[in-house]
Image (tube, grey):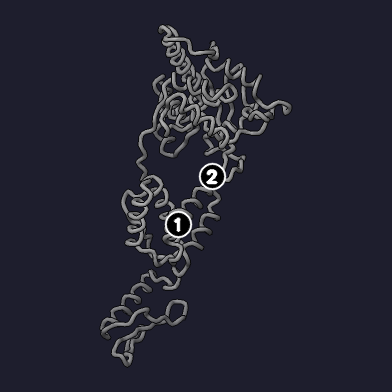
């Protein structure tokens, strides 16, 4: 007589096995066995799992992936833009394959097959890597919740992105882009390159955040725009995003002129720094059209995004003598690893970086002005110290 579980034979000749689980409920094997020995071996494995406290409810993973994934996103408490990204990746890349599966039905072979199909169908490895990381994070939580025994996402390196190196604009190209977008938006180009400020940070800048005498801008909040067109005012991307940005001196004239001519009027210090022709807050969609026309006019690659101006700013700051920590502080970036290994960058050091950037741009402009003109190019905005 067995001391754990029971086995019996059906009329067909096959064998079944059952046992009492730790909750007192009788459980029966989901499959039948060819022989009595196979049924007893299965019971021995279950008994060992229980004794090691490694047993899990076989029905625990019978939770629909779509239901669990949407609940997972809702409970993250992430920024609106991140929430939007997660839901878009789910809708376009994960749910079409996995929505009909329960959590315990998603196996390593299914994950590998899904990834291969997505890479072939989209030819967008960066997007597939993001989708894989999201799938892995959701299923890791499911494993922590003991709904599945082990995360089936086990493809080494599948979540790493290997995006192509971003283009870097020259000082001359930044000036040309600033001219091409028009006077109302030229300061935004310069702040994107020489701040370097994120577009969502610029969208929420106010008059009170600008100090002309000290040539500083204080970043307090951000206002990203969702794909729905909704403008979401809230915290910066990280705590490091809340910062003072010391600007190079050559921007003084542009900054002063923008405050006098284009910043929101009638609200005093609370007036937005960037508003449209009708006084409405900055909108990514409307500015995007101006940016694309300017990019074409200047002859920049189609893939050169406004956000890439930050990459330009990083590079020029480094060339002017800034350390990696200096550029992190300036751009409002943070990570635990960087905080441990990079040296401190205080306010005085940031002034030195801004001064070096100021000298570099002035020198580049002076070189251009010393070169013979190839012809008259029409009216040009006068730049001065």
The quadrant holding residue 384 is: top right
Of residue 184 and residue 211, the one placed in the foreground of this image is 184
Identified at 58% across, 15% down, the residue is 253
- Whether residue 233 is visible here, answered yes or no, is yes
Question: x and y percent of residue 3 in the render?
Answer: 34, 85
Instruction: Give how far across and how far down residue 385 sits, in percent.
Output: 54, 11
The answer to whether residue 258 is left or right of residue 13 is right
Q: Is residue 235 left or right of residue 167?
A: right
Q: Is 84 in front, or is 328?
A: 84
Residue drawn at x 35%, y 76% is 46
3D distance between C-alphas at marks 2 and 1: 18 Å
Where 159 sits versus 54, above or below?
above
Query: Which label is found at residue 84?
Result: none
Q: Secondary structure at mark 1?
A: helix
Q: Is residue 343 visible?
A: no
Label 1 near label 2: C-beta < 8 Å?
no
The residue that label 2 is drawn on is 81
Image quarter in which the N terminus is found:
bottom left
Q: Please tell me which residue lies in front, 295 or 321.
A: 295
Question: How far from the left and from the top, in percent, is residue 32?
Answer: 32, 82
Q: Which residue is mark 1?
A: 138
The residue that appears at 36% across and 52% down in the rendered structure is 121
Mark 2 or mark 1, earlier in chain: 2
Name the residue located 59 percent from the left edge and 18 percent from the top edge.
214
């Amino acid at each position: 007589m067995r001391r754990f579980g029971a086995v019996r034979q059906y009329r067909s000749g096959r064998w079944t096995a059952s046992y009492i689980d730790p909750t007192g409920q009788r459980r029966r094997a989901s499959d039948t066995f060819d022989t009595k020995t196979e049924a007893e071996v299965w019971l021995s494995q279950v008994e060992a799992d229980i004794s090691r406290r490694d047993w899990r409810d076989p029905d625990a993973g019978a939770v629909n992936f779509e239901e669990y994934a949407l609940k997972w996103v809702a409970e993250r408490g992430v920024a609106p833009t991140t929430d939007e990204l997660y839901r878009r990746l789910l809708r376009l890349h994960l749910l079409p394959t996995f929505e009909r599966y329960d959590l315990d039905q998603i196996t390593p072979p299914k994950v590998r097959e899904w990834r291969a199909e997505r890479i072939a169908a989209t030819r967008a490895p960066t997007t597939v890597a993001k989708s894989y990381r999201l799938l892995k994070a959701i299923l890791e939580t499911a494993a922590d919740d003991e709904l599945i025994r082990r995360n089936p996402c086990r493809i080494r390196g599948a979540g790493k992105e290997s995006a192509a190196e971003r283009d870097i604009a020259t000082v001359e190209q930044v000036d040309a882009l600033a001219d091409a977008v028009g006077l109302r938006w030229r300061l935004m180009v310069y702040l994107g390159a020489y701040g370097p400020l994120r577009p969502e940070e610029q969208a929420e800048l106010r008059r009170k955040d600008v100090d002309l005498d000290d040539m500083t801008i204080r970043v307090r909040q951000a206002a990203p725009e969702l794909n729905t067109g909704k403008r979401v005012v809230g915290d910066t991307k990280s705590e490091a995003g809340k910062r003072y940005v010391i600007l190079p001196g050559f921007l003084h004239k542009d900054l002063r002129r923008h405050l006098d001519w284009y910043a929101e009027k009638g609200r005093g210090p609370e007036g937005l720094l960037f508003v449209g022709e009708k006084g409405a807050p900055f909108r990514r969609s409307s500015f995007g059209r101006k940016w694309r026309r300017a990019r074409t006019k200047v002859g920049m690659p189609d893939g050169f995004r406004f956000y890439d101006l930050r990459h330009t700013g990083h590079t020029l700051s480094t060339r002017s003598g800034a350390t990696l920590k200096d550029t992190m502080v300036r751009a409002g970036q943070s990570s635990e690893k960087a905080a441990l290994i990079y040296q401190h960058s205080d306010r005085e050091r940031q002034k030195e970086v801004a001064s070096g950037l100021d000298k570099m741009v002035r020198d580049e402009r002076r070189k251009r002005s010393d070169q013979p003109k190839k012809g008259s190019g029409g009216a040009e905005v006068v730049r001065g110290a």
